[in-house]
Image (spheres, grey):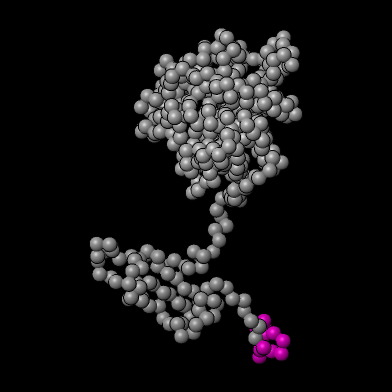
């Protein structure tokens, strides 16, 4: 009799579906009894029969061709007693592993429209008159010879920024502002010299930049802790945003750079707006979102690349400093900049970056909390949402928590008192802010 379960049409035996283990045994001459290959010390186990053919490899033994101990391959104890590992179990997908969000490739943002679509940035490709942009570039390159590299402690060692920098203050904006202390702790908590006054060319540039920033702010969503303007003053009289300080950076050549960071908000306050002017050779500006812990398994952060040519202005709107980090990485090669004015100017591989900032009156240096070390604390945002996770509440950008933290370790050989406290804008008497009831 013919077993119908094992026959197909015409009484022919039906083909059995083969798996990976069967495919490995298609070569019949190799179907032998269990053996140990003396050359490779690889255990191969083959069981006869069409349904149970398996190959196992012992991954616990050395895979070298020579069993003689050498300095590079010392003798190791025998491991034949360990059970062999099924090859198909190694190649099989691990379906029990934790699912992760798909990794996204970096995305080049080549137009102002794309930049606004994917990031909290606004791009103005040409912000200043061409002649003014060149005059400002030449003036800043000249004074940059006196700038210095910032130094601070990181992971128990002193590190140095891979570019030079300086701090500028705009006189006549806030007569009672303590400029010296603001400058002293503006970068990494390191005491610095008094701020330099704005150059005449910087003052000229402010007229164009201030107008562009305020027009952009009026078209955007405002956050509850943003500065609402001076009380009792009309918007036309006192602009919402007015640059009273500037951090200037100089990148000479393709290798000078700055790593991923967000700007300190100690004197900027929550949800700041920063205007970044680029002069000279084009460099890449990269921004990357910091994904809150509660969303880390659902989505992956993406890096966005924004080329910054000469005379371009990037406005970093809220919540850029709260949700993103940015960098100017080193590059393999860069194009030289050929200034249009004055005629026959020498080509240059220098990029000057001026970040115009508005230090809020309600975050003056004399209102900054001090830690047990005696130094001013720094104001930071809870970028990863750790505080919100502990409180087990969901949130959006409006629920960002800010905290004061000791930063003495950046200059005190890494030693810190560990001070940490939540910022309470109402109890600290700050404002006015956009949010009602604050």
Which contiguous range is marked in magenta? Answer: 1-12
Task: Relative to 166, say whether 30 is above or below.
Answer: below
- The residue positioned farthest toward the front in the image shown: 344
Q: Quadrant of the N terminus?
A: bottom right
Q: Residue at x 56, y 55 (%)?
A: 96
Q: Position of residue 250 (x, y in %)?
A: 49, 33
Tell me where residue 387 sits by quadrant.
top right
Q: Residue at x 39, y 33 (%)?
A: 159
State the residue at coordinates (41%, 17%). 373
Total marks shown come to 0
Q: Where's the C terminus, which quadrant?
A: top right
Residue 204 or 421: which is nearer the viewer?
204
Image coordinates for residue 333, horizontal then vertical, percent: 50, 48
Where does residue 273 sit, x and y in percent of width and height? 63, 27
Pick the front one: 41 or 180: 180
Residue 293, above or below 24: above
Q: Is residue 53 above or below residue 255?
A: below
* Residue shown at 56% from the left, 50% from the top: 98
Residue 112: in sight, yes or no? yes
Residue 270 visible to the viewer: no
């Amino acid at each position: 009799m013919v077993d119908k379960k094992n026959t197909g049409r015409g009484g022919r035996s039906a083909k059995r579906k083969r798996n990976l283990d069967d495919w490995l045994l298609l070569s019949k001459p190799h179907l032998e009894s269990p053996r140990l290959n003396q050359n490779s010390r690889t255990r191969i186990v083959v069981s006869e029969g069409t349904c149970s053919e398996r190959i196992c490899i012992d991954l616990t033994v050395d895979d070298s061709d020579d069993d003689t101990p050498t300095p590079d391959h010392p003798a190791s104890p025998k491991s034949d007693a360990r059970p062999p590992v099924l090859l198909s179990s190694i190649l099989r997908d691990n379906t029990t592993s934790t699912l992760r969000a798909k990794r996204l490739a970096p995305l080049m943002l080549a137009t102002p429209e794309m930049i606004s679509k994917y990031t909290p940035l606004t791009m103005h490709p040409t912000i200043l008159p061409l002649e003014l942009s060149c005059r400002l570039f030449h003036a800043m390159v000249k004074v940059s010879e006196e700038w210095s590299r910032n130094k601070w402690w990181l992971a128990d060692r002193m590190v140095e920024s891979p570019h030079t920098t300086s701090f500028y203050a705009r006189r006549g904006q806030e007569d009672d502002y303590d400029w010296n202390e603001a400058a002293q702790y503006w970068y990494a908590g390191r005491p610095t010299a008094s701020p330099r006054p704005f150059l005449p060319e910087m003052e000229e540039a402010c007229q164009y930049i201030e107008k562009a920033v305020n027009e952009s702010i009026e078209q955007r969503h405002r956050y509850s802790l943003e500065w609402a303007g001076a009380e009792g003053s009309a918007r036309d009289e006192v602009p919402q945003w007015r640059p009273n300080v500037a951090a200037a950076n100089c990148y000479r050549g393709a290798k000078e750079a700055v790593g991923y960071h967000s700007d300190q908000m100690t004197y900027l306050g929550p949800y700041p707006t920063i205007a970044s002017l680029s002069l000279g050779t084009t460099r890449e500006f990269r921004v990357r979102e910091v994904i809150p812990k509660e969303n880390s398994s659902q989505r992956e952060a993406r890096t966005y690349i924004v080329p910054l040519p000469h005379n371009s202005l990037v406005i970093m709107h809220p919540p850029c400093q709260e949700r993103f980090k940015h960098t100017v990485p080193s590059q393999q090669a860069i194009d030289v900049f050929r200034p249009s004015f004055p005629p026959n100017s020498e080509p240059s591989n220098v990029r000057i970056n001026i970040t115009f900032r508005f230090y809020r009156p309600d975050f003056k240096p004399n209102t900054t909390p001090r830690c047990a070390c005696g130094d001013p604390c720094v104001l930071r945002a809870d970028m990863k949402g750790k505080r919100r996770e502990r409180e087990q509440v969901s949130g959006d950008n409006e629920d960002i928590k800010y905290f004061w933290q000791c930063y003495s370790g950046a200059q005190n050989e890494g030693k810190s008192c560990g001070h940490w406290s939540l910022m309470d804008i109402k109890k600290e008497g700050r404002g006015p802010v956009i949010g009602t009831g604050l």
